[in-house]
Image (cartoon, grey):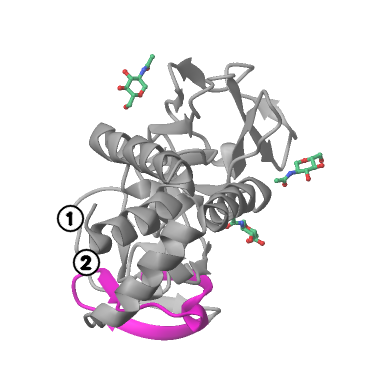
């Protein structure tokens, strides 16, 4: 195999191992705030073993109740909530039969007439994030003011605001208001550090370096196994850390095939 593509596949492997086996809760529509009577679908991403899952929530009234039990309607790998109520605001998570727990998601349901549509999952450092200030009834795109941690940060004529290249300092409690309509609830936006894997040099690597790494790769199969095990262990142990943003780009079947190829290749190298 060509040296550079082998390297790429290795990096790809460690990326995929952090996403395919991750216990992950996703929300559609992907907004941390909803209006009373909105519809929302929450999905527990299942791992290959499909051991089963339970979607649970804590609200101010009741803790650890599960979907289908007084609230929500189980629908395949999702739980659908129709006509959601402000009392259903709270923290939602998936529990898997083998003990894994997904990321937690805060949902806030407003009985008022303005919401802030902000990312429901943590955003990656460097990403652009768009916040939308919305009224319950049209017209949309009304001028809105955005606040972070209680201070006005921007007034936008069209009701949406993009924070470019978010950094850790953008993390905080956001809300917005639209004159004559009211103020939205507040939502916390979490910013995650970029995993090291994407901090690879983008400039071409010198052929010498590639050769060097290639030789390391060929002569140290145990090194690779260790790396794989560590990365698998990491993602099991770190629970919800990497899940959200990576799973937003759902791994396709094709990628899974490539993943299998890599395993095969690495195994072959063992008999080298
Ligand atoms: C949910 O409520 C239970 C019982 O009060 C508590 O032990 C648990 O930490 C809560 N979980 C979250 C994610 O808030
Ligand atoms: C649940 O929501 C999903 C996504 O909107 C939809 O495709 C599905 O038909 C719904 N299922 C039920 C039983 O309501
Ligand atoms: C949920 O909201 C609480 C209170 O605002 C905050 O402390 C917590 O970090 C939030 N959790 C997530 C996963 O956003």
Instruction: Residue at 66%, 35% (x, y): give it.
Output: 100
Q: Secondary structure at mark 2?
A: loop
- The percent coordinates of residue 59 (x first, y second) are 67, 40
Left or right: 271 as drawn, with respect to 223: left
Residue 32 at least partly seen = no
Number of residues whose C-alpha sits closer than 10 Å to that of mark 2, classed few (under 14), some (14–19) or many (20 or more): some
Against 193, is 256 above or below?
above
- The percent coordinates of residue 151 (x first, y second) are 50, 85
Question: Residue 160 falls in which quadrant of the image?
Answer: bottom left
Q: Are marks 2 and 1 in contact (CB under 8 Å)?
A: yes
Check if residue 156 falls in the magenta segment. yes
Left or right: 88 as drawn, with respect to 6: right
Nearest the eye: 272 or 190: 272
Query: Which residues make up the magenta segment?
Result: 151-177
Q: State how far apart marks 2 and 1 are (Cα).
A: 7 Å
Marking on residue 142: 2
Residue 63 at least partly seen = yes
Instruction: Residue at 60%, 53% (x, y): give it.
Output: 226
Against 44, is 239 above or below?
below
Instruction: Look at the numbered disc 1 and say if its residue's Cβ is closer than 8 Å to ligand 2.
Output: no
Residue highlighted by disc 1: 139
Instruction: Residue at 27%, 37% (x, y): give it.
Output: 252
Q: Quadrant of ligand 1?
A: top right
Nearest the eye: 189 or 242: 242
Check if residue 54 falls in the magenta segment. no
Judged from this view, the residue extending furthest toward the front is: 272
- The percent coordinates of residue 235 (x first, y second) are 58, 50
- The percent coordinates of residue 183 (x first, y second) are 44, 65
Question: Residue 78 falls in which quadrant of the image?
Answer: top left
């Amino acid at each position: 195999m060509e040296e550079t593509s082998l390297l790429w596949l290795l990096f790809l492997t460690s990326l995929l191992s952090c996403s395919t086996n991750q216990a992950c809760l996703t929300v559609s529509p992907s907004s941390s705030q909803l209006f009373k009577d909105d519809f929302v679908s929450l999905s527990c991403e299942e791992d290959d073993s499909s051991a089963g899952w339970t979607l649970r929530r804590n609200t101010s009234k009741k803790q650890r109740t599960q979907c289908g039990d007084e609230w929500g309607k189980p629908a395949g790998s999702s739980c659908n909530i129709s006509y959601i109520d402000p009392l259903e605001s709270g923290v939602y998570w998936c529990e898997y039969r083998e003990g894994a727990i997904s990321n937690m998601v805060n949902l806030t349901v407003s009985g008022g007439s303005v919401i802030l549509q902000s990312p429901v999952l943590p955003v990656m450092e460097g990403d652009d994030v768009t916040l939308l200030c919305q009224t319950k009834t049209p017209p949309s795109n009304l001028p809105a003011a955005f606040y972070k941690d209680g201070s006005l940060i921007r007034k936008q004529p069209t009701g949406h605001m993009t924070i470019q290249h978010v950094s850790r300092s953008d993390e905080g409690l956001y809300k917005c208001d639209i004159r004559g309509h009211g103020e939205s609830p507040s939502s916390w936006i979490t910013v995650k550090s970029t995993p090291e894997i994407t901090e690879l040099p983008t400039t071409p690597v010198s052929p010498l370096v590639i050769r060097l790494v290639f030789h390391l790769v060929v002569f140290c199969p145990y090194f690779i196994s260790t790396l794989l095990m560590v990365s698998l262990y990491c993602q099991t142990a770190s629970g919800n850390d990497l899940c959200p943003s990576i799973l937003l780009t759902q791994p396709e079947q094709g990628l899974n095939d490539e993943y299998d190829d890599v395993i095969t290749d690495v195994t072959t190298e063992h008999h080298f």
